[in-house]
Amino acid sequence: MSTDMNAAVIANTNTAFQKFREREQIRLTLAVDATNMCQFACGYCYFGDKGRRKVDVNRVFQSLRNFLTLFSDRMVDLTVHYMGGEPLLAWKEILNLNSRLRPYLAEMAVGFRWSLSSNLAALDSKKAAHLKADNANIHCSLDGPPHIHDKTRPYLSGKPSFRSVAANVPLALSFGPKDTARVTVCPEDAKCLLEVTEFIFKRGVESVCLFPAQHMDYDAHSIDTSELPPFRHSIPEWCYDCEARAYCNGGCWADNVIVNSCSTVPIRSRCALLLPRQMQSAST
């Protein structure tokens, strides 16, 4: 990343953070890497070689406590989003950290929710029941139809993973019907975005986040931008206080979320990505 781009990112982050601190009520989402372990060997994975480390619950709990003191007088809700690796492989550690956070936040009269990003391979009925009881959300990774998913997301053994992942999608939707699918797009699949998203929508998922694979070169003509929201170099100001932002998994400002309108959650229809295209362009 260039020096100018680094400076732009820092300036944009500082502006967003300052606006965040100026709020009278603060609802905060923090991401925690639960482990670097994973059953998959995705060629685009930013972790590279997989390890066997799991989150240090005591250290993370103390860090969260220290961080939350910055907003303790106005904190209303905290959401912890677990990532990895594959966070379901650190299930005990996640439950341990949650059990430490709940009483601490309750003393501060702060609401607590949690969620995770998962490849779904380790999801089972027991974990699903716990997630449902906690009203937790799951953000599943699914790269599209079998011929794409199995190419990009094989098991460490090299075997295809689509069948086991797809089998657990209904289980994930049984407790999180509003959950989002994450698609990592390789350059050779960039022209298949509509095929990929339509395939996932047909499985019952209501929104899809599209992420270009890291460290891979893209042809400027690979993607039909007429099918996507307009590109922006910074977080649009309307996203700071967007009522629908809780349903975009933090992706709305990156312009990479394709959302199905949801009649059971009217607030989602207020997301800028669902507005007519000319209104989006006028807002950039």
Image: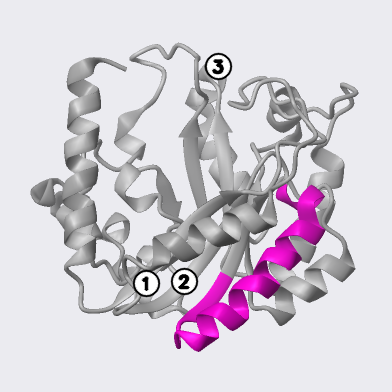
Please name the residue that numbered disc 1 is placed on.
Answer: 27
Residue at the image position 65 percent from the left and 38 percent from the top: 144
Pick the quarter of the image with the C terminus: top left
Asked if residue 176 shows in the view, the reply is no
In the picture, measured across the screen, residue 284 lies left or right of residue 277, that is left
Q: Is residue 79 visible?
A: yes
Numbered disc 1: secondary structure: strand
Q: Which residue is mark 2?
A: 78
Task: First in sequence, mark 1 or 2: give its number.
Answer: 1
The disc, 2 or 3, on the residue closer to the chain's N-terminal end is 2
Q: Is residue 266 left or right of residue 45?
A: left
Labelled disc at residue 188? 3
Q: Quadrant of residue 244?
A: bottom left
Q: Is residue 173 above or below residue 86?
A: below
**Residues at circles 1 and 2 in contact by the CB criterion of under 8 Å:** yes
The CA distance from mark 3 to mark 1 is 39 Å
**Residues at marks 2 and 3, CA–CA distance in whole angstroms:** 39 Å
Task: Residue 99: say if magenta.
Answer: yes
